[in-house]
Image (cartoon, rainbow, N blue to C red):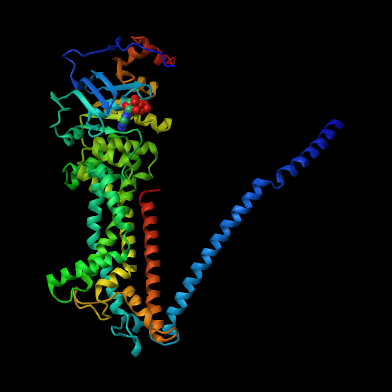
Amino acid sequence: MLKQYSFEKTAVQTFPDNVSLAMRTENLQVFYGANHAMHDADLGFPKNQITALIGASGSGKSTYLRSLNRMNDNIATVTGKIWYHGVDINEPNVNIYEIRRHIGMVFQRPNPFAKSIRENIVYALKANGIKGKAELEERVETSLKGAALWDEVKDSLDKSALALSGGQQQRLCIARSIAMEPDVLLLDEPCSALDPISTVKVEETLLELQKKYSIIIVTHNMQQAARVSSQCAFFHLGHVMEYTPTATMFSNPQIPVTQDYISGSFG
Amino acid sequence: MEQTNFQLKKQDAQSHEWDARLHRATRATRKDWIGRGISYLCIGVIILVVASMLWFITSKGIATFTQNHVSLWKFLSGTNWAPDQGNIGALPMIVGSFAVTFAAAIVATPFAVGTAIFMTEISPNKGRKVLQPVIELLVGIPSVVYGFIGLAVVVPFMRHLVGGSGFGIISATFVLFVMVLPTITTMTVDSLRAVPRHYKEASLALGATRWQTVSRVILRSATPGILTAVIFGMARAFGEALAVQMVIGNAAIMPKNLISPASTLTSQLTTGIGDTIDGTLPNNALWSLALILLLMSLFFNALVRFIAKRGQLKNGR
Ligand SMILES: Nc1ncnc2c1ncn2[C@@H]1O[C@H](COP(=O)(O)OP(=O)(O)OP(=O)(O)O)[C@@H](O)[C@H]1O
Ligand SMILES: [Mg+2]
């Protein structure tokens, strides 16, 4: 039996006006048909920081994350507001392709295309109308460097991406996303399919990337959340229960449900 | 020491007992044997039937060259087909077969791929509920019905449209187009559905449009499957006898255009098979046509395997 926790008692931080936010959601709710998978999420994501979303399986982390760049279109009904540069991008008439250019996403399973390493990166650029050969070359190099993959693949850019190791594939997926020069990078458990060494590499990459991008990462690994994130949100059964600076969350959780989850005595 | 020895002996005796128990036949092992025996028997029979068919067609097919001393080159390049008079030029039928096959495949493929994209990407619900049953129905219609419709509708229509008799390659192409369309469509649908979902998600998350995703990711990764579908369609068109025979006009002459009567390997076979005597040149010549059909179907098979292998390499599996 799962212990019952009150959804009334939450501890969700808001940010003062002088903190500039990359994105913010207001009353975000998500429904899969009749399944109310996300209730009233009000979260702000500070610029150039890493925010971790943690919580048990099925608590709605992916559901929330996928709503942020409208990947839930045609899959779920998303209500509420998603503020990005002062625009509510949850309105039906915004250009979702443009949104996804600025808000990139990396998935749990490394999912490079069955194309060469170079083609994987060039694909998205071409799809967005970037054509010049020199510019493409340059973006391939900078994005691979940004994802800390350049040194490992610079001599084999025309090899199939599927020949890379899982960790390299995932960094290629990150490179592919940052080649578009987005503002925000969403990552859904990017390390869950990786070994510890590849995980460290990806984490180092993220810490480096936060200088340029605002990052939101879903993770099941609490050490990982502690290592990389500045802010941490705890999800429980479709509710955001606690959102505090990571240091606070792990040393001094505010409410019982978070305490139990972090100490491992959940449920 | 003594004691160890004793123990060893006891163990030996025990393991002997186990040895016997674990090796003896039981109901379960006997059932295994029977099952295996039956399946080997079936496989053996099938292999025997296939092998003797291959041998039969081949030996009959090459008799034209070994017994009647027709040169292979003349057979393949000659344009005069009159076996009664000893003229065995099969080129008109070869050309006819390839012409209708390629024409039907070229016309059908865009329709098939378009329909398949509609069924998988644009409107999966309608695709499953409306189009799928329609296509399955089309697959099940016997070819004589297609031929009959061709004869009753297509041929008069062509006669009206372009003059002449209405029989010819273009009518055959049209009938074959309708016949291979469902084959190519269903197999293309399968290969589109088999494209991993995460390719699509990755592409959309990069800001690619739905159309870009379909054309550059989904179609590309499904290409080996689509090629296979087209080849199966071509194999069906190449081997179709009855429907083609009913609309092509069956004139064993080099086709000069698309609207004059022509013939294919299959239509010539079905037309000629009744009037020849076993062992004579006209009969052997027909077997040679059959041999070409057999070789072509082997070729189509090899092509499909080759594509499957290449596809696996490309996808790094
Ligand atoms: N595509 C979908 N269609 C219908 N329901 C879904 C879909 N995706 C998720 N759900 C439901 O939404 C709820 C939240 O799922 P979600 O995938 O967001 O959880 P999660 O926190 O990401 O879990 P995990 O840690 O296992 O990835 C679950 O009840 C799940 O069944
Ligand atoms: Mg998830």
The spot of residue A22 in percent (x, y) is: 20, 23
Left or right? Give the position of B34 relative to B223: right
Ligand 2 occupies quarter = top left
The spot of residue A256 in percent (x, y) is: 37, 9
Q: Quarter-wise, where is residue B198 in the image?
A: top left
In the image, residue A37 sits, relative to residue B137, either above or below, namely above
Q: Is residue A236 visible?
A: yes
Q: Is residue B103 visible?
A: no
Left or right? Give the position of B59 relative to A108: right
Please identify the residue farthest to the bottom as the structure is shown: B85
Q: How many marks?
A: 0
Q: Quarter-wise, where is residue A36 in the image?
A: top left
Left or right? Give the position of A48 relative to B17: left
**Quadrant location of the N terminus of chain B?**
top right
- Looking at this view, is A161 or B251 the one in front? B251
In the image, residue A65 sits, relative to residue A158, either above or below, namely above
- Looking at this view, is A244 or B275 the one in front? B275
The spot of residue A166 in percent (x, y) is: 39, 38
Residue shown at the point (23%, 67%) measured from the top left:
B150
The spot of residue A28 in percent (x, y) is: 22, 21
- Looking at this view, is A150 or B272 the one in front? B272
In the image, residue B196 sits, relative to residue B260, either above or below, namely above
